[in-house]
Image (tube, rainbow, N blue to C red):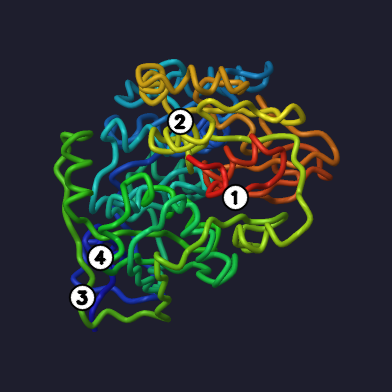
């Protein structure tokens, strides 16, 4: 019986020739990552298991959720992982001001590459599947175990084969693709499964598109999302990493639970309505409704805070002004992207339009800071979740969308079609 990409990676890291869906294995880990929320919770468990991490080059700490620290507790959390990183002499501690949001900075810094087995104490760790790695989020006990032993048990997931064909139209990006897919299969449509993105359409997606799609695989319930390695992937890794990597390809006779087809040509700008990512509506459906007036827009996060996202938002906002009833937070995902925005003149566009530009951070994505909402307020956000109370008050509403839709909505004051802006 053939194996999927994910199954091949897990088999290799478990030292096995063959694995199958449902099998319990113990695999060696290439990267173990935690942040300023999950890391401090894992440390007491780790200290019961070991005095030293299994490999100081493979354990990563990233303070990004409540940084710059918003209160005393968040400052204490960052201090805890900072002191741990120094004590353990970790190679990868990404201090604020020198890094950014974890799922953007790890690929950018070359920490993660193809063929690796990666765990992170954050559900959107599945982002690195864009590089052809097995990457998944776990809890604090598992992270502590990974830090101490360099190994972790997994149940081998079955898989969904998502076949992409065609080419993305203007104003349509990876965010629209993944919202379209989640709208099609539901938030539990891939529960504990691997989503393998294949087909001729993959070559039409930028790395930014792939990171966005893999990032939100978890929103369909998936264990992980993964893309095959191609020239685009190899070029990205050559630019960002010096690590060796291994390419795994699915066998022709690999077994899949189902095959889902997505024609990129037919994907429209898409918005996920409250309170689930599966509540997907095309922009055409939105335009047929009464205007949905908004009070806030967030452009950034580990989902859509890369330089391509900044450029797309700036193209919409250039020469325009944010609506008087709307406030806009622009959050480049890393310091490198922030600086690139300055060099390309994007910061001038954002500030001239009336946006607040925040330092790289998760910020308002999970209601942390720098954009928390009050009761009754609506936000168009390029983040990845729109659960009840996710970005503030339980009576606030979050609409997930692409940077283009978010920027157009900021100008009009209601959820708007970027195609109508006239760029």
- Closer to the chain start, of discs 4 and 2, is 4
**Whether label 4 touches label 2, CB < 8 Å:** no
Circle 4 is placed at which residue position? 11
Circle 3 is placed at which residue position? 251
Q: Residue 36: x percent and y percent? A: 54, 29
Circle 1 is placed at which residue position? 417
Q: Tell which of 333 and 225 is nearer to you.
A: 333
Q: How many marks?
A: 4
For this view, does 239 lie left or right of residue 284? Answer: left
Dot 1 crowding, Cα within 10 Å, few <14, some 14–19, many 20+: many
Foreground disc of the pair 3, 2: 2
Circle 2 is placed at which residue position? 333
For this view, does 139 lie left or right of residue 55? Answer: right
Quadrant in which residue 84 is drawn: top left
Residue at screen point 68% across, 38% down: 412
Question: Does dot 3 land on a helix, a strand or a loop?
Answer: loop
Q: Residue 283: x percent and y percent? A: 61, 57
Q: Residue 128: x percent and y percent? A: 35, 48
Quarter of the picture holding the N terminus: bottom left
Q: Tell which of 81 and 261 is nearer to you.
A: 261
- Closer to the chain start, of discs 4 and 3, is 4
Dot 3 crowding, Cα within 10 Å, few <14, some 14–19, many 20+: few
- Closer to the chain start, of discs 3 and 1, is 3
């Amino acid at each position: 019986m053939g194996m999927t990409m994910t199954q091949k990676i897990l088999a290799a890291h478990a030292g096995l020739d063959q694995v199958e869906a449902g099998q319990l294995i113990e695999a060696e880990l290439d990267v173990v990552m935690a942040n300023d929320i999950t890391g401090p919770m894992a440390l007491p468990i780790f200290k019961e298991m070991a005095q030293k991490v299994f490999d100081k080059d493979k354990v990563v700490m990233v303070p990004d959720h409540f940084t710059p620290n918003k209160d005393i507790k968040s400052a204490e959390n960052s201090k805890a992982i900072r002191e741990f990183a120094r004590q353990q002499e970790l190679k990868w501690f990404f201090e604020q001001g020198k890094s950014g949001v974890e799922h953007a900075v790890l690929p950018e810094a070359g920490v993660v590459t193809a063929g690796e087995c990666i765990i992170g104490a954050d559900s959107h760790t599945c982002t690195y599947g864009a590089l052809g790695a097995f990457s998944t989020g776990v809890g604090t006990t598992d992270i502590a175990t990974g830090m101490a032993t360099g190994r972790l048990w997994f149940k081998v997931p079955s898989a969904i084969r998502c076949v992409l064909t065609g080419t993305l139209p203007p104003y349509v990006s990876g965010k629209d693709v993944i919202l379209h897919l989640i709208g099609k299969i539901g938030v539990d449509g891939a529960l504990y499964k691997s989503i393998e993105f294949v087909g001729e359409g993959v070559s039409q997606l930028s790395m930014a598109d792939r990171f966005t799609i893999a990032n939100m695989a978890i929103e369909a319930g998936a264990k992980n999302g993964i893309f095959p390695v191609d020239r685009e992937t190899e070029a990205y890794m050559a630019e960002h990493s010096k690590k060796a990597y291994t390419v795994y390809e699915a066998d022709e006779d690999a077994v899949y639970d189902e095959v889902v087809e997505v024609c990129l040509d037919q994907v429209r700008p898409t918005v996920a309505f409250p309170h689930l990512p599966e509540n997907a509506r095309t922009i055409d459906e939105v335009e047929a409704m009464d205007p949905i007036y908004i009070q806030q827009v967030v452009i950034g996060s580990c989902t859509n805070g890369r330089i391509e996202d900044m450029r797309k938002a700036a193209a919409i906002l250039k020469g325009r002004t944010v609506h008087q009833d709307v406030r806009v937070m622009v959050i480049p995902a890393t310091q490198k992207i922030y600086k690139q925005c300055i060099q390309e003149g994007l910061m001038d566009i954002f500030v001239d339009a009336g946006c607040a530009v925040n330092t790289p951070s998760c910020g308002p994505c999970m209601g942390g800071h720098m954009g928390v909402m009050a009761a009754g307020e609506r936000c168009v956000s390029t983040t990845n979740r729109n659960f009840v109370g996710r970005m503030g008050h339980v009576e606030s509403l979050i609409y997930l969308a692409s940077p283009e839709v978010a920027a157009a909505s900021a100008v009009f004051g209601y959820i708007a079609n970027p195609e109508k802006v006239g760029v």
